[in-house]
Image: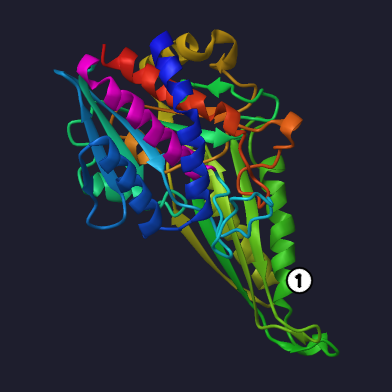
Amino acid sequence: MKSIVTQCRQIEDKLISLRRELHKCPEIGGALPRSRAIVCRELDALGIPYKLNAGDDGVVAEIKGAKDGKTLAFRADMDALHLTEATNLPFASETKGLMHGCGHDAHTAILLAAAAVLNAQRDTLCGTVRLLFQTGEETGTGAKQMLAEGALDGVDAICAIHVGNLAGDSLPAGAVVVLPGAVSAGKDKFTLTVRGKGTHTAFPEKGVDPILVAARIVNACEELSARELPVGSAAVLSFGSFLAGIDHNTIPDTALLKGSIRAQDVAVRSFLGERLTDIAEGIATAFRATCEVEIKRGSATVMNDPALSALVSDAVAAAIGEDLVFTSLPSPLMGSDDFANYAAKIPAVYFFLCTNNPEKGITAANHNPAFDVDEGVLWEGVAAYCATAAAYLK
């Protein structure tokens, strides 16, 4: 284990350099040509064979050990977000309106660095490590495409790491959180189209104001968690977009609301969707408007395999120290990830590397224009992957 940690620390400069290079070129969805080119360049330099997906820009590589054994996969998501970066970093996004605001640049760099360390140790590996560089996590399409192209064929287990402060602000930089059981919320996206009747703002009585109707829907939905779910339910309904009109003196015909429903329990998730529909349509009718409700089913809850979680937490603790590994949290996590698609197929562990650091001024949440990571702890992600591979393929 000391040898693994030493090698992970030795590759730290390369790891940070890769993260910064990827950070400059954020791409979204399934088309990530620049990101894929970087991944392929690094794999070529290491002599690691890989296959390009046919349906998107995903890459699947393999490191075969000297002896036969099990196959363990690691997943890194490569896509970015529709955000205008506000970090003022010297390696900030070079693409206007796009940003690596969730840490997927770090995920990709960590897995590439782990590939270098594991490839150097392949003569001691009893089995195979498969590397999944995935597109479209934010759109919920990447994991499905990977599965469709056989990325999990022959794989016995899979792990993925996520950076940021998704596990909470109270944990120190460099903390690793490995939770057995439910580790995320299932997510659905919704779009509400409120249709009223446009008019001049001087004569509101001649129209039906969709802005007021939409505002009432937002306010009413705030009562769902407080009054219609049991106390302590792991569920959230949030609005992320409210679009209506373009002029100061015109009441528009329509207002558009977008948001998401997140819940760890499938029944609660369905209930919130039903009640959202009831409330939106009912309020619209009451105020002489109409409301079209569209709900798109998204990722399921990520379920960590208990036995594999124990193996991962023990391996990581041996690598970076027991004091930095946490196996429980005071409250459930409400993020979501299409890694759930893999976890539904084979034993899986999705764990967290805490990269916020108030002492360095790195405090912004994931999906914030000011989001950044403490690069000084990224090597721990490499060590976590390598230690897990060594333990699982023993």
Q: Which residues are magenta?
A: 103-124
Q: Residue pushed farthest right?
A: 202
Determine whether 311 is above or below 23 in the image: above
Q: Quadrant of residue 377?
A: top right
Work out whether residue 28 or residue 189 is closer to the camera in this orientation and state it: 28
Q: Report the residue marked by disc 1.
A: 212
Q: Is residue 112 magenta?
A: yes
Residue type, label 1: Leu
Which residue is drawn at the image coordinates 59% and 21% (left, top)?
Answer: 175
Determine whether 155 is above or below 335 in the image: above
Determine whether 236 is above or below 110 in the image: below
Image side of residue 98 versus residue 390, left or right: right
Magenta stretch, overall SS: helix
Q: Residue pushed farthest left?
A: 68
Which residue is drawn at the image coordinates 26% and 11% (left, top)?
Answer: 394
- Does the rendering let one see residue 184? no
Work out whether residue 155 or residue 343 is closer to the camera in this orientation and state it: 155
- Does the rendering let one see residue 99? yes
